[in-house]
Image (spheres, rainbow, N blue to C red):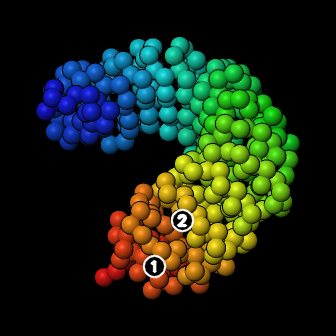
């Protein structure tokens, strides 16, 4: 089977192989198969690896990987895994890291994407400014220093297309500095999480990024409608997350519907100024939608569901949430579920609607 379907298996099978090896104690056999199918993408979690760890690490270190997601308990394994990875283009690290480990990453000549998802507070001032010419950056941990992030972004001005950042430590002006260092001719994806000091200046700056396809901002409060209108003027978004954002109105929703024909994901949760008509039009017109979140949109009623539930409607939709929408009845959602059984529909209490 491995030889018959090697190309498909090479992308998805390695994590399962490692788990099986740990349970059976036969990693040496698996190692040969791993070499045969020329693994390029690897997800490796050290958790629960209690046997033949050296063999596993030795095997991984000999692979010519292009993408690696890694979570280790022992830092001394880090350099052993990376030592031969000269073709590595994408690296995601899901563990605390210090400057000595960070220095190892600068020796990866082909590295284009760096994702640091630590999810813990880091006391050490990580020297992010030593990286340059990256196309995608994700920074998720507590304790990051805004000036180091600024240097990192500046060093990738000509190449950076995607930026995802947890920004709890950033103030208003520091975030504006970051946005001013992004190349409007390049940036396509921007996720700003846990930043609580948005102003119209930030939104207007975002509106300059005309290639932006994916945007996630959270709790952007005291934002004017006109700023949001400008943000969505003439842009063809595929993903929009405006959870708990002010300035989201029917006029803004109309702008989104008019321009974003390839929209796949939208989160308008807790928007208090959108109403039934334009939500219904969204369902009718945005036929590529896969996920829709309308959590806490209290002004919506059963009338936001299109009256003409033809077969082509919701063709690609997989998740629809009306959690905390007290005026959208379970009866209406059950009727909807009976027609579109493949859609996960969430009702007022956050529970999936079932027709049974």
Pinpoint residue 240: horizontal percent, then vertical percent.
62, 52
Asked if residue 189 lies left or right of residue 246, the reply is: left
Q: Do the residues labelled 1 and 2 touch (CB within 8 Å)?
A: no
Q: Can residue 166 be seen in this view?
A: no
- Of callouts 1 and 2, the N-terminal one: 2
Asked if residue 66 lies left or right of residue 16, the reply is: right
Q: Quadrant of residue 191?
A: top right
Above or below, comparing residue 201 to residue 248 in the picture: above
Task: Name the one closer to the observer, 55 or 356.
Answer: 356
* Circle 2 residue: 283
Report helix, strand or loop for mark 1: helix
Q: Quadrant of residue 105?
A: top right
Local crowd size for mark 1, using a 10 Å CA cut-off: few (<14), some (14–19), many (≥20): many
Task: Name the one closer to the observer, 237 or 297.
Answer: 237
Residue drawn at x 77%, y 36% is: 178
Quarter of the picture holding the C terminus: bottom left
Task: Name the one closer to the observer, 89 or 257.
Answer: 257
Residue drawn at x 65%, y 55% is: 258
Pinpoint residue 169: horizontal percent, then vertical percent.
75, 46
Pinpoint residue 35: horizontal percent, then vertical percent.
24, 20
How far is disc 1 from disc 2 in space, using C-alphas? 14 Å
Please give the label number shown on residue 310: none
Residue drawn at x 36%, y 18% is: 64
Of circles 1 and 2, which is in front?
Answer: 2
Pinpoint residue 137: horizontal percent, then vertical percent.
61, 33
Report helix, strand or loop for mark 2: helix
Q: In which quarter of the image is residue 304?
A: bottom right
Quarter of the picture holding the N terminus: top left
* Circle 1 residue: 333
Above or below, comparing residue 155 to residue 200 in the picture: above
């Amino acid at each position: 089977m491995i030889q018959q379907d090697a190309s498909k298996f090479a992308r998805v099978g390695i994590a399962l192989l490692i788990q099986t090896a740990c349970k059976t104690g036969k990693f040496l056999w698996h190692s040969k198969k791993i070499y045969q199918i020329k693994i390029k993408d690897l997800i490796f979690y050290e958790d629960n690896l209690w046997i033949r760890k050296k063999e596993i690490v030795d095997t991984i270190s000999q692979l010519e990987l292009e993408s690696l997601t890694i979570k280790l308990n022992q830092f001394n394994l880090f350099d052993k895994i990376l030592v031969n990875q000269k073709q590595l283009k994408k690296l995601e690290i899901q563990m605390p890291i210090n400057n000595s480990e960070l220095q190892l990453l600068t020796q990866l000549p082909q590295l284009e994407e760096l994702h640091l998802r630590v999810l813990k507070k880091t006391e050490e001032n990580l020297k992010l400014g030593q990286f340059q010419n990256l196309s995608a950056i994700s920074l998720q941990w507590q304790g990051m220093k805004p000036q180091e992030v600024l240097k990192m972004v500046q060093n990738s001005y000509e190449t950076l297309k995607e930026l995802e950042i947890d920004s709890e430590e950033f103030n208003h002006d520091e975030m504006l500095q970051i946005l001013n260092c992004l190349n409007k001719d390049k940036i396509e994806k921007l996720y700003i999480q846990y930043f609580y000091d948005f102003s119209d200046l930030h939104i207007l700056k975002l509106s300059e990024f005309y290639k932006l396809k994916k945007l996630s901002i959270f709790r952007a409060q005291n934002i004017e409608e006109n700023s949001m209108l400008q943000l969505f003027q003439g842009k063809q978004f595929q993903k929009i997350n405006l959870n708990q954002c002010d300035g989201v109105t029917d006029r803004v929703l109309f702008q989104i519907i008019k321009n974003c024909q390839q929209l796949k994901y939208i989160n308008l949760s807790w928007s208090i100024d959108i109403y039934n008509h334009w939500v219904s039009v969204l369902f009718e017109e945005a036929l590529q939608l896969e996920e829709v979140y309308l959590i806490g949109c209290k002004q919506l009623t059963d009338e936001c569901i299109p009256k003409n539930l033809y077969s082509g409607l919701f063709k690609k939709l997989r998740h629809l949430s009306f959690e905390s929408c007290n005026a959208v009845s379970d009866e209406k959602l059950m009727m909807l579920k009976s027609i579109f059984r493949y859609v996960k529909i969430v009702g007022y209490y956050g529970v999936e609607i079932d027709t049974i």
